[in-house]
Structure formats: structure tokens, C-alpha cells
Image (tube, rainbow, N blue to C red):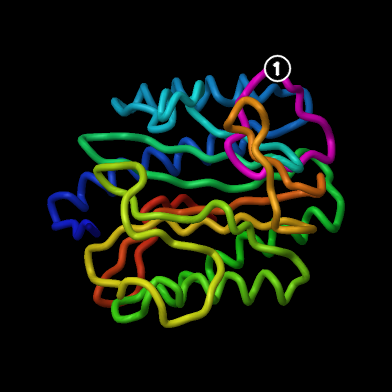
């Protein structure tokens, strides 16, 4: 069942999402050569806890960290470790914070130092595809109108959209209904209603959209070893323009 949030619940969600967005921004500022993914994860953990919140991802389904940090060909669910970031890497950071009974969820891909023009384009297209989908995140549209807009924009730029993982509702639970794919024909799925909160999160690959999950059962990589990028925000459906809840300056 899709959860419709009232004003009291939305105020709590805004607080959770503000913490989440600040954690993402902090992680992004740390992406530079010489820093380990574990150091970024610790900073994210410590910040979220300092705000009186809990990291949504820590121990979620057994995930061992507070942030998913996915480098280069890792699509999602990268486990932070001793890997030292190097010039030219692209680093996707996915974070969530649980505060007063509600979750925020957001992600972005950051350049590590100077990156290739191809990698720059991938990051830019992935981010813009979110905003193309957001145009349809309004009351009366259907979920797949968002999906279709994301896919159309990504493929028009020569990239592919991951099929095996998708966006989702978010609120009292980290993953709620409805499912929000990043691909598909328009005019399908649940109709969007005021008070719905969803995570729109394009995952975009340079090559094939096929992915595989490694033996740790978390780390998901591109099947062809090519680069991948990720961008996500928690979004509120209103009776007007959608509201990005995980908003920070410059997004």
C-alpha cells in the first residue's frame, strides 16, 4: 500500500532528508585523491549520529556500512574499505538517515580530481536525467511517466539505464511502494498523489545496462566493466511543483 504523508509526518521527513542531504554533501567534499572510501563512510556515520539520527543503511539487510560508496564500474552498494581514491575515479555515494521515525535517501556521483570528458558527460547526463523525470513528478501523472522521461533522456545521450535496480517510495520504511523504475512506457503504474514521497534514482551506464552482483552479495558492477553513475533525491508530490526534500545548495 502506498503511504500518503500528512503535514506532521512530512515535517519529520523534511528533517530526516535535510540530515541526509548534508551527509551526501559532506561525502562529496571528501572525494579527492588519497582518501579511502572507509574514511568517507566514517565521516558520514559520525555526522548522521551527531545530528541525533541513525544511518539508514547500517545493518540494513546486513549491509556493513553507513554509506554505499561505489567507484568507477561499481553501480551501487559498494562497501567502503581501504581503497584509496585516485585521480580520475568517479565516486557514487548513496546515503540515508533515519530521524524521528522517517528516512531520507539520496545519492550523487562525484569526480575525483580531473576526470575524462566521457566521465564528465556520464555524471552530467545522469544528474540531468533525474530532473527530466522530476518534470513528471506531479499530481495526476503516473509513475512510469517519470520512468519514461529518464530513459528517453539517457538513451538520447548514448548511455543505458540499469534495469535490475530501481527507485522506490520512502518514508517510515527505507523502501516502500511504489516502485519507481528508470525505464518503461509512459502512462503506467500508480497515479501520483499529493503526499506521496518517492526516491527517484537513475543509475546510468556507459555501456550495457546489464549488471552483476559480486560474491559479497552487495557490490553491483557493470557487466562490461565500463563506468556507471548514480543520482538520487527524495521527492514529495504536491498539488503543484514537486518538492525535493533532500535538497542542498547546488543540489
- Percent position of residue 192, x then y: 30, 72
- Using the image as rendered, state which of residue 165 and residue 96 is in the foreground: 165
Q: Quadrant of residue 188?
A: bottom left
- Percent position of residue 186, x then y: 48, 81
80 sits left or right of 59 in the view: right
Range shown magenta: 75-90
Q: Is residue 89 magenta?
A: yes
Question: What residue is drawn where x is 36% and y is 46%?
Answer: 175
In the picture as drawn, the residue positioned furthest to the top comes out as: 82
Vertical placement of residue 129 versus 54, above or below: below
Question: What residue is drawn where x is 57% and y is 70%?
Answer: 150
118 sits left or right of 59 in the view: right
Majority SS type along the magenta span: loop
Q: Secondary structure at mark 1?
A: loop
Q: Quadrant of residue 16?
A: top left
In the picture as drawn, the residue positioned furthest to the right comes out as: 116
- Using the image as rendered, state which of residue 54 and residue 149 is in the foreground: 149
Q: To which residue does mark 1 refer?
A: 82
Vertical placement of residue 189 versus 27, above or below: below
- Percent position of residue 34, x then y: 77, 23
Amino acid at each position: 500500500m502506498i503511504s500518503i504523508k500528512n503535514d506532521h509526518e512530512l515535517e519529520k521527513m523534511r528533517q530526516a532528508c535535510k540530515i541526509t542531504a548534508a551527509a551526501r554533501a559532506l561525502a562529496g567534499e571528501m572525494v579527492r585523491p588519497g582518501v579511502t572510501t572507509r574514511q568517507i563512510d566514517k565521516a558520514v556515520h559520525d555526522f548522521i549520529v551527531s545530528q541525533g539520527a541513525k544511518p539508514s543503511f547500517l545493518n540494513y539487510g546486513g549491509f556493513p556500512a553507513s554509506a554505499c560508496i561505489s567507484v568507477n564500474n561499481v553501480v551501487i552498494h559498494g562497501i567502503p574499505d581501504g581503497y584509496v581514491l585516485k585521480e580520475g575515479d568517479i565516486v557514487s555515494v548513496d546515503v540515508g538517515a533515519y530521524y524521528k521515525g522517517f528516512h531520507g535517501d539520496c545519492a550523487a556521483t562525484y569526480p575525483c580530481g580531473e576526470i575524462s570528458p566521457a566521465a564528465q558527460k556520464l555524471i552530467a547526463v545522469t544528474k540531468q536525467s533525474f530532473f527530466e523525470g522530476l518534470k513528471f513528478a506531479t499530481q495526476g501523472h503516473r509513475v512510469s511517466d517519470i520512468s519514461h522521461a529518464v530513459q528517453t533522456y539517457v538513451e538520447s545521450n548514448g548511455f543505458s539505464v540499469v534495469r535490475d535496480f530501481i527507485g522506490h517510495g520512502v518514508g517510515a520504511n527505507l523502501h516502500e511502494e511504489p516502485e519507481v523504475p528508470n525505464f518503461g512506457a509512459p502512462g503506467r503504474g500508480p497515479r501520483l498523489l499529493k503526499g506521496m514521497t518517492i526516491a527517484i534514482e537513475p543509475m546510468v551506464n556507459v555501456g550495457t545496462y546489464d549488471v552483476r552482483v559480486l560474491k559479497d552479495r552487495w557490490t553491483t558492477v557493470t557487466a562490461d566493466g565500463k563506468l556507471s553513475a548514480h543520482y538520487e533525491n527524495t521527492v514529495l508530490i504536491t498539488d503543484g511543483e514537486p518538492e525535493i526534500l533532500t535538497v542542498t545548495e547546488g543540489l
